[in-house]
Amino acid sequence: FLSSDPFRTCGKPLKPSPGTGNARPTRSCFSPALAMARPSAALLLPLVLLAAALISAAQGFLADSPTDRRLLVLVDDLAVRSSHSIYFRSLESRGYDLHFRLADDPKLALQRYGQYVYDGLVLFAPSAKKFGGSVDLAAVLDFVDSGHDLILAADSSASDLIRDIATECGVDFDEDPTAVVVDHIGCAVSQSDVDHTLIAGDDFIQSDVILGPEKIKAPVLFRGIGHSLNPTNSMVLKVLSASPSAYSANPKTKLSNPPSLTGSAISLVSVVQARNNARIVISGSLELFSDRFFKSSVKKSKSSTKHEKSGNEQFAVEISKWAFHERGHLKAVNVRHHKAGEIVEPAMYRIKDDLEYSVEIYEWSGTSWKPYVADDVQVQFYMMSPYVLKTLSNDQKGLYSTSFKVPDVYGVFQFKVEYQRLGYTTLSLSKQIPVRPFRHNEYERFIPAAYPYYGASFSTMTGFFIFTIVYLYNK
C-alpha cells in the first residue's frame, strides 16, 4: 500500500518549489504511516516550550528563596543600559537575571502559557506612549495584582501611559506636563543649573527596613517631576520628600498662578506595598539612578558641607533591596495551638479551657532566614469581634507564644494574627476552631455562684420546720 515515493499526489511526483529543489507535499499526499508520525513530531516543540516556561516560572519568587529572580527592564533607548550601568550591575551582583527590552518591542510579553515569565518589572521608559506586544496598562496592573514587584522612573517627558500607571498605584504626578520640581534654597550647587531644578534631597523616611540600617549621609541628587500621594490610599508612603521651599512649575515661564504642588507635600520618591505584599517604587527622576549622579559630588545650597559622592547609589541600592524583598520580608511557620499541658491540637475546645498558642516568625536577610524579634505581635481569639487579645512573647529565636483561658462563650472562633508594620510584609494568619459548652455531666455538683440560693432554700426550710414545731406544741 505504501508508495516508495512518499511525496506523490494522484500517482504523480510533486515538482520542486521554485528556487529550492524540494517538493512541498500537502496533508492529503501523505501516506498513513507518515501522517501518523509527523503530528507527534509537530507536537514536540510546543511541549518543550511549555516545559521551559514552567521551569522558568518555578525559578521565580518563592517564600523560601526571595532572591535569584528574573527582572524585565523596559527602556526607551538601549543606551540607558550603559548610562545606568552601576545600578544594573548592583542588581546582577545580588543574583538578579536582567532582561533588557525596548518598551515598544513587538514581541514583548509578561506571560507565556498562562505563567508569568518575570518576577519583577523595571520601567525606565518614561516617554513610552505604549508598550509593544501584549503589554499594556492592564497587563502591568495585573502583574502587580499577581504579587510581583515594580520600579517605575519618570522624568519631564513622562507619557500619559506612565502617568496612568502611577495614578493606579496611588501617586499623582503634576498635571502640567512642563512642570518640574524647582527649589531655590534646597537645590544643589551647580554652575550649569541656573533654573535650580537640580534638587539635593535629604528628607528621608525614618525606616531602617526601607532604606537600610546605615544612615544616608549625603543628599540625593534629583532632577525631574514631583508627585503627590492619593489621600485615600493608606498604602503609599513618601520615601524622599522635597524641602518646604520647593514647588512644581515650568522654570522657563513666569508664574501666573500659584503652583499646585508646593513644599513638603511634594514627594520625589514614593513606595507602595499592596495588600498582597507586592512592592512598588515610583521615582519622578530617571537620572536619580544614573552613573553620572552616582559619581557626582554634591553640595547643598546654603550649606558649607560638600560631599565627595552623592547619596544616590546608596539610596537606589537600598530601596531596590526593599522593593525586591531582600529586606522586610516575613514568613510565619509552625502555627500551633493546644490545651495547656498537651501537645496534640484538638478538634474542639470547651469553654474555660486553658490553651496555648504559638507561631514562628522569620525575616529574610538577603541570604538566609533569621529569627524576627519584635514585641508588638498580637493574637486575637475572634468571633465577630475579638474576645481575647494577647501580645505574644518571644524567645529571641523566632518563637512567639502565649496562653489564655477560652472565654465563657461557645461558637466558632478563630485564632487571628494580623501583623502590619512599616516596611514589612503583612502577616495574615487565621485558624478556625469551634468552642462547645459544658456537657450535662461536666458541670460542678455545687456551683459556688449558687451558694446564696442554696443558703436561702435551706434557711427557708429550717425556718418553716421551727415555725411548725412552735405552732403545734405552743400552749
Image (cartoon, grey):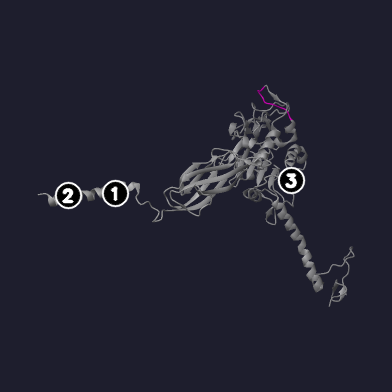
Residue 333, can we see it?
yes
User: Which tag is nearer the camera, tag 3 or tag 1?
Assistant: 1
Residue at position x 67%, y 50% in the image: 136
Q: Residue furthest left?
A: 475
The span from disc 1 to disc 2 (Cα, nearest Å) is: 20 Å
Q: Position of residue 410 (x, y in %)?
A: 43, 52
* Numbered disc in front, either 3 or 2: 2
Q: Residue furthest top?
A: 304
C-alpha distance separating marks 3 and 1: 79 Å
Residue denoted by label 1: 454
- The image's mark for residue 97 is 3
- Where is the N terminus found, in terms of image quarters? bottom right
Under circle 2, the secondary element is helix
Residue 435 point in image, percent of width and height: 46, 52
**Mark found first going from the N terminus, 3 or 1:** 3
Residue 467's mark? Answer: 2
- Indicate the position of residue 207 as horizontal and vertical percent values: 61, 35
Q: Is residue 357 magenta?
A: no
Which segment did they paint magenta?
296-303
- Establish if 19 lies above or below 76: below
